[in-house]
Amino acid sequence: MINYLLIPAWFVVLTLPFLGISGSLKLGAALLAGNIVVSFARAQGLAPLRNIKGNLYQRLERLKKIDRRLSIGVLILILAILPFGLNRYAIDIAIIAGIYIVLALGLNIVVGLAGLLALGYIAFYAVGAYAFAILSTQYHLSFWSVLPIGGLLAAIFGLLLGAPTLRLRGDYLAIVTLGFGEITRIVLNNWDEMTGGPNGIMGIGRPDLFGYRFNTPEAFYYLILVMAIFTAIAVKRLNESRIGRAWVAIREDEVAAEAMGIDTVRMKLLAFSVGAAIAGIAGVFYAAKMSFVSPESFTFLESIIILCMVVLGGIGSIPGVILGAVVLIVLPESLREFQDYRMLVFGASMVLMMVFRPQGLLGSSTRRMEFEPADDRVLEHEDESLYDVKKGEKI
């Protein structure tokens, strides 16, 4: 009974300041009635629902056999022609979404594959951004020459962070990485001679390629699109390699992985450095796009937003992480007309996702099996064994 009343009561309290007593109570009553109806339907028709679920899985397996390269090609073609139908504001939002896609893919290596909870990931993003800002304004280096330098410096900082935290796990590792992120922001805010302090650094150079200068939103859109595609391909190859399988083994059981011969110290350091390098590259692009950087752009809240993208889309799932980044960037902007309610909708959607679909929007099959109760899988297997597949009749 408590489970039936918990969610409706939560919504009543949440919407009380906006809908009033009568409106919030009506909403709670509607949610309670819907919850009872759904629970009754599950109790009465559990076996048919399992059969429907099995049929859907079979159809999905058939659809997976279709050549994915064609689907990916069509998607890339749509993204390539997308700026022709958007205004300047929409293109800027798409560029920001592309930056966060790259950042989320990098954090997915640390959190999703290696299982290392990092709350200071934005520090590596800041390292890349300030590396290009300083080298561009003081030493007049180009964007393309600083791009690998920014990634390398961020990877070095990742090694410096990972080395003393190898013995830490879970919440303790999260606290240490959080402190690292805050230390980085405070150093950037107080090192006036090098970083400009709170005023930041202005006049950062723009990228140019074969005489063409990137100074329009369309040019930056195509640049971040190429960077996001290459990042997704690289992360996918890593995920399917022996290194990716070693990371997943460490995430599931570090003691068992070490017993099987995996060098957990080297693999964890590699996860930190690769994820940090991707964030540093994204930071170089951010500095080139904005032509200005300041410590206020690299706060703890940014790390939380990137982590929410990974969790919302699906930990360990590359399409899920991309979808999560797009949703968390585009959804608040699309709800800007409802400024009084958009954060309420955003927070409520996150809570509902964690309650009803903890594996994420497009969670990987491995994570989906982890969140699915083992008893349900056994019951489904027993029900399927009662049917004759050839005759389609129950035995």
Image (tube, grey):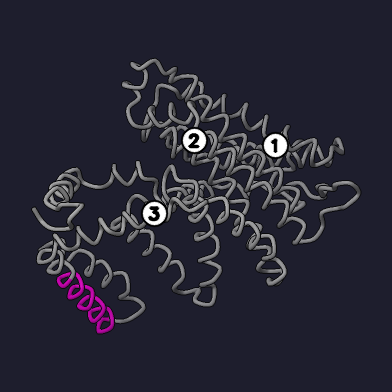
Q: Amino acid at mark 3?
A: Arg
Q: CA distance from mark 1 to mark 2?
A: 39 Å
Mark 1 burial class by Cα count in 10 Å: few <14, some 14-19, many 20+: few
Say which residue label 3 marks: 62
Say which residue label 2 marks: 239
Tell which tag, 1 or 2, sits nearer the viewer: 2
Q: For residue 83, which quarter of the picture?
A: bottom right
Instruction: Tell me where residue 161 appears, x and y as whole percent.
Output: 53, 27
Specify which label sits upstream in the sequence, 3 or 1: 3
Q: CA distance from mark 3 to mark 2?
A: 24 Å
Q: Amino acid at mark 2?
A: Asn
Say which residue label 1 marks: 191
Q: Secondary structure at mark 1?
A: loop
Q: Residue furthest front?
A: 391
Q: Residue at x 43, y 51 (%)?
A: 64
Along the viewing direction, whichever of 89 and 181 lies nearer the viewer: 89
Instruction: Tell me where residue 146 appears, x and y as whole percent.
Output: 77, 36
Mark 3 burial class by Cα count in 10 Å: few <14, some 14-19, many 20+: few
**Residue range (magenta):** 21-37
Given contact means CB atoms under 8 Å apart, are the residues at marks 3 and 1 in contact? no
Q: Is residue 363 magenta?
A: no
Mark 2 burial class by Cα count in 10 Å: few <14, some 14-19, many 20+: many
Classify the position of the N terminus by image quarter.
Answer: bottom left
Q: Residue at x 29, y 44 (%)?
A: 369
